Amino acid sequence: MKLTMNSKIDNGSLQVWLRMFLVLVMLMVSASVWSQDDAGNKADSSYRLGAGDILQINVFNQPDLTGEYTLDGDGRFTMHLIDKVDAADLTATELEALLVSKLKPDYLVNPRVSVRVQNFRPYYIMGEVKRPDSYAFVDGMTFLTAIAKAGGYSYRGKKDHVFVIHADDPERKEVKMDVNSKVRPGDIIRVAERLF
């Protein structure tokens, strides 16, 4: 009889320990996911805005100001009350601070603004591909993926590298890159013709 009671107590203790172990595992997984999200946000925080980017701007408790804004060819957009805003070469965080400074003195007492890139500016592909054009940027894509989206190589296309002008390069210098390198928003990609 004592043996049975002790085994019941042991089973109860075991269940408590199992529950505690599962809670600990769930907390560790949650912490891992949060740290990965933070790492992604840090990478996004260095992105410089440019022509063609579509932004989701939220101004807390201001539905007339909250919405989707597309940057024009000069990297500007128009917002109710404050008119033209020059967002070119700013990060999302810098744009948030700029909007707060424009709204605070005259329109809102304590504006809270958040800016998120809804869609990155397109990249452009030309040269020896079947469908040269502009295409929507997808985070993490390679030049080879971009070529595939453009219908693949033409029969004359050089397949081991591409020439690229990065949108954030002030000198607009064309650089030779491996086809497995990553595309950046606004890149101009040229697939060269092979000689034979």
Image: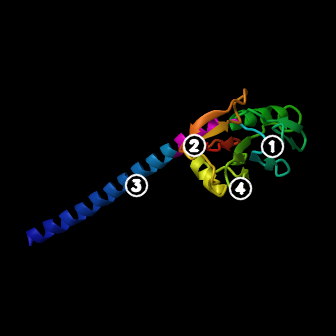
Tag 2: amino acid = Lys
Q: Is residue 74 left or right of residue 33?
A: right
Q: Is residue 120 visible?
A: no
- The answer to whether 171 is drawn above or below residue 39 in the figure is above
Q: What number is the disc on residue 26?
A: 3
Q: State the residue position of label 2.
A: 182
Tag 3: amino acid = Met
Asked if the stretch drawn in magenta spans residue 44, the answer is yes
Residue 95 in the image, given as x and y percentages of width and height: 75, 35
Whole-angstrom CA distance, mark 3 to mark 1, is 42 Å
Return the disc, 4 or 2, that comes first in the chain's sequence: 4
Q: State the residue position of label 4.
A: 131
Whole-angstrom CA distance, mark 3 to mark 2, is 34 Å
Q: Is residue 164 left or right of residue 69?
A: left
Q: How many marks?
A: 4
Tag 4: amino acid = Arg
The magenta span reads 37-48
Q: What number is the disc on residue 71?
A: 1
Whole-angstrom CA distance, mark 4 to mark 2, is 20 Å
50 and 86: which is toward the camera: 50
Return the disc, 3 or 2, that comes first in the chain's sequence: 3
The residue that appears at 68% across and 36% down in the rendered structure is 166
